[in-house]
Image (cartoon, grey):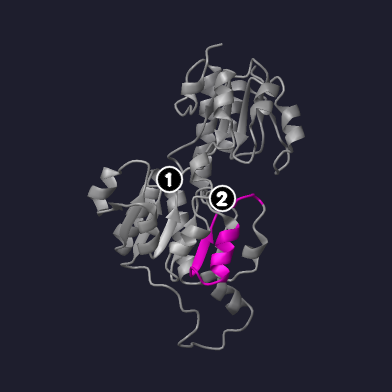
C-alpha cells in the first residue's frame, strides 16, 4: 500500500481513482489551507503527495517528504508554488493539470470583461438596494465591446482561446504579446504580434494570460497603466503578482483606466484594501476553473499523474523532467 497524502479535499473523481488503486490514504479533513508547520509534518515519509496551488512546496517541504517520495502532483495548471528545480535535484517528480481548464478560464475572463465593461456588479448592488426608480439616460454607462480592440498579454492555451472566442463572437481586433509568435492565432483570427507598449496604448481591453515567472513579476505596473486608454478595461485571470496591485488600485481610483476584473491577487487570499472600496473593479475569489466538469477532470489528471509516478512511469504532465536526477 502506498503512503499518500492529499493536502485538501478535491472532487471525488480523483479521490476514487486513488481509493480503487491503493485503498486508504490520508487527506486533510478540513476545507482550508494547511499552515507551513502542518504541511511539513504531514508530508513526512510519504511516497506521494497530491498538493494544491495554495500549498508552498519549497525545498524544506520537499526534503521533509523524504528520499522515498516519488512525486508532488499539483492540482493546478500553474506550478509557481513548487520549487521544481529542487524537486528534480531531490529526484522528486512534479506534475500539473494543463489543458483541461483552458475553456473554463477563457470563459471566466470573458465574464469578467463583460461584468466590468458593463458595470454589472455595480448596477446589481444598486438594484438590490432599492435605488432603481426607473430608466435613465445616464444610468451606469459602460464600454462597448463588439468591434473593439482586445490586447492579450500571453497568447498560450488560455490567452489564445480567449482571443478566439472574442474575435469570432464579438468581432474584436486582437493584439497580442508572447514569448514566441503564435502563427495559428494569426492565421485563424488575424491576431497581430506587437510589443507591450503598443498593445497597452491601442487596446480597449487588456487581458493577462502569461505565466508567473521572475521576468513577469509586476509586468503591469504604474508605468504600464499610464500607457492605457482612460476607457480601458483590465482583466487578470493569470497570477496576481504579475500585476502591481497598488498601482492598479491607484489607476482605477484616479481614472487612468475605466474598470478592471480580477480573479487573482498578489497575496492571496488577501486583496489590496484600496481595491475593496472601489466600485469599478469586479473581484472574483480565484474561481476561473470552477466548473463541475473542469474541477473533476483536474482531480482525475492529478490522480493519474500520481499513480503513474508510483507505478514507475513518467507522468504525462511532469513539468520538471529537465531537473530530474536519477536516484
Task: Tell whether 73 sits left or right of 228.
Answer: right
User: Camera-side residue: 64 or 179?
Assistant: 179
Picture residue at 45% right of the left edge, 87% below the top? 137
Which of marks 1 and 2 precedes in the sequence?
1
Picture residue at 53% right of the left edge, 16% below the top? 311
Q: Which mark is residue 102?
A: 1
Q: Which mark is residue 240?
A: 2
Residues in magenta? 246-269
Q: Are marks 2 and 1 in contact (CB under 8 Å)?
A: no
Q: Looking at the picture, does residue 169 appear above or below residue 15?
A: below
Q: For marks 2 and 1, give the CA distance.
A: 18 Å
Q: Quadrant of residue 245?
A: bottom right
Can residue 283 be seen?
A: no
Tell me the element at label 1: helix
Task: Tell whether 158 sits left or right of 31.
Answer: left
Front position among marks 2 and 1:
2
**Residue 176: image location, x then y, percent:** 35, 52
Considering every residue shown, the one lying at the far left of the view is 187
User: Camera-side residue: 245 or 311?
Assistant: 245
Amino acid at each position: 500500500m502506498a503512503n499518500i497524502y492529499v493536502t485538501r479535499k478535491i472532487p471525488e473523481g480523483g479521490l476514487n481513482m486513488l481509493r480503487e488503486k491503493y485503498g486508504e490514504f490520508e487527506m486533510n479533513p478540513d476545507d482550508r489551507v494547511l499552515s507551513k508547520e502542518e504541511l511539513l509534518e504531514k508530508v513526512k515519509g510519504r511516497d506521494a503527495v497530491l498538493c494544491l496551488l495554495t500549498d508552498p512546496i519549497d525545498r524544506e517541504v520537499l526534503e521533509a517528504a523524504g528520499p522515498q517520495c516519488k512525486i508532488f502532483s499539483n492540482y493546478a495548471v500553474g506550478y509557481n508554488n513548487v520549487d521544481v528545480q529542487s524537486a528534480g535535484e531531490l529526484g522528486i517528480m512534479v506534475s500539473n493539470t494543463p489543458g483541461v481548464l483552458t475553456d473554463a478560464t477563457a470563459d471566466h475572463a470573458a465574464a469578467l470583461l463583460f461584468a466590468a465593461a458593463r458595470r454589472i456588479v455595480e448596477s446589481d448592488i444598486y438594484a438590490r438596494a432599492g435605488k432603481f426608480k426607473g430608466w435613465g439616460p445616464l444610468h451606469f454607462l459602460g464600454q462597448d465591446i463588439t468591434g473593439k480592440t482586445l490586447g492579450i498579454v500571453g497568447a498560450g492555451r488560455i490567452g489564445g482561446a480567449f482571443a478566439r472566442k472574442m474575435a469570432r463572437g464579438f468581432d474584436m481586433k486582437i493584439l497580442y504579446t508572447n514569448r514566441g509568435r503564435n502563427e495559428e492565432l494569426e492565421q485563424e483570427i488575424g491576431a497581430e504580434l506587437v510589443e507591450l507598449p503598443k498593445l497597452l496604448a491601442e487596446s480597449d481591453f487588456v487581458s493577462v494570460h502569461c505565466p508567473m515567472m521572475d521576468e513577469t513579476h509586476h509586468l503591469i505596473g504604474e508605468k504600464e497603466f499610464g500607457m492605457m486608454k482612460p476607457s480601458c478595461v483590465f482583466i487578470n485571470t493569470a497570477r496576481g503578482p504579475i500585476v502591481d496591485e497598488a498601482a492598479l488600485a491607484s489607476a482605477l481610483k484616479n481614472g487612468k483606466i475605466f474598470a478592471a476584473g480580477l480573479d487573482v491577487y498578489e497575496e492571496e487570499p488577501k486583496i489590496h484594501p484600496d481595491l475593496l472600496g472601489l466600485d469599478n473593479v469586479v473581484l472574483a475569489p480565484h474561481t476561473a476553473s470552477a466548473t463541475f466538469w473542469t474541477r473533476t477532470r483536474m482531480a482525475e489528471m492529478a490522480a493519474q499523474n500520481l499513480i503513474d509516478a508510483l507505478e514507475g512511469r513518467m507522468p504525462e504532465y511532469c513539468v520538471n523532467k529537465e531537473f530530474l536526477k536519477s536516484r
